[in-house]
Amino acid sequence: MKRVLLFLFVLLFAASACAESAVLSFSSFDGGGYEYTAVIEDPAVLSFTASREYGSSRKAYETGSAYQMVFEFTGLQAGETRIFISAESPILEYFEMTYIAKVNEALEVSLSAEQSLAGLRLYRDGRRIPSVSYEITRIGQDYYLSADYEEPSIMDPEAVKALYEIFETYNLTVWNGFSEIGPTVVESEQFDLEIRLSDGSLLRAVGDNAFPPDYREAMDAITAILKDAAVE
């Protein structure tokens, strides 16, 4: 009996001593939803398992069935690393997210979303400015810039940082959802802006002779950076 009690004590102690893992969960559906992939920048610090979780009534693959893609991260040694989550779909736009993972001496894992620029689309036209169209895409840790629908060129990382600084300086988050048409004026201008951040959030704003706060200053700064952002 003592041996049994001792054995149970060891099991309980081992369970209580296990490091605390962390979980990321993303929604999707079969037959066209996002396929999520995780990559750890420093695999010596962290490992993970991936699984799909459906409702209890679902038994097999069914087009349209919703599920959660669950990543569970376990600490291997104390340190810090980034986690890159990519989302691909045959019918939805590709995007990436970045998280910071911190592992303490007890191998407990904590996660926080890293917010940086992950993608951008901009169309701007007006009488006082030339018509321009830009698109920024990120693949891994590299950024690519396409101007006026030309073939993408690799982008200067400093330009990416400068664009994100404009996002923060002018608090472009408040632009999200802006969609207005103003009265016709001599110096008419239209714009269509979409910004995706590495935490998965998306900003969309459109205007025709109507503009969100600090538009002129922020947009002039954005287009000035994009004009020379491609690496020759």
Image: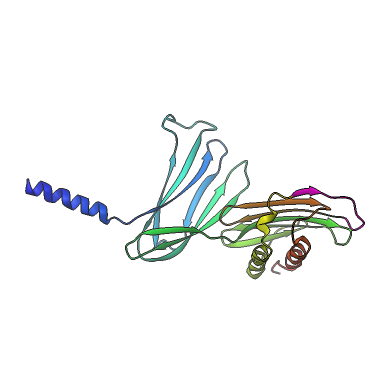
> As drawn, is 5 to the left or to the right of 126?
left
The quadrant in which the N terminus is found is: top left
> As drawn, is 228 to the left or to the right of 86?
right
Question: Horizontal and vertical percent for residue 111?
Answer: 45, 58
Rendered position, 74 above or below 159: above
The coloring applied to the image is rainbow
Question: Horizontal and vertical percent for residue 59?
Answer: 42, 30
Toward the right, the furthest residue is 186
Name the residue: 16% across, 51% down: 9
* Residue sitting nearer the eye, 128 or 180: 180
Place residue 20 in its image quadrant.
bottom left
* Magenta-drawn stretch, dominant element (helix, strand or loop): loop
Check if residue 100 falls in the magenta segment.
no
Rendered position, 70 above or below 211: above
Q: Which residues are magenta?
A: 179-189
Question: Horizontal and vertical percent for residue 109?
Answer: 39, 58
Question: Horizontal and vertical percent for residue 185?
Answer: 90, 54
Place residue 123 in its image quadrant.
bottom right
Check if residue 184 falls in the magenta segment.
yes
Place residue 160 in its image quadrant.
bottom right
The quadrant in which the C terminus is found is: bottom right
Name the residue: 90% across, 51% down: 184
> As drawn, is 133 to the left or to the right of 126?
left
Rendered position, 170 above or below 6: below
> As drawn, is 56 to the left or to the right of 152?
left
Rendered position, 47 above or below 34: below
Total marks shown come to 0
* Residue sitting nearer the eye, 171 or 41: 171
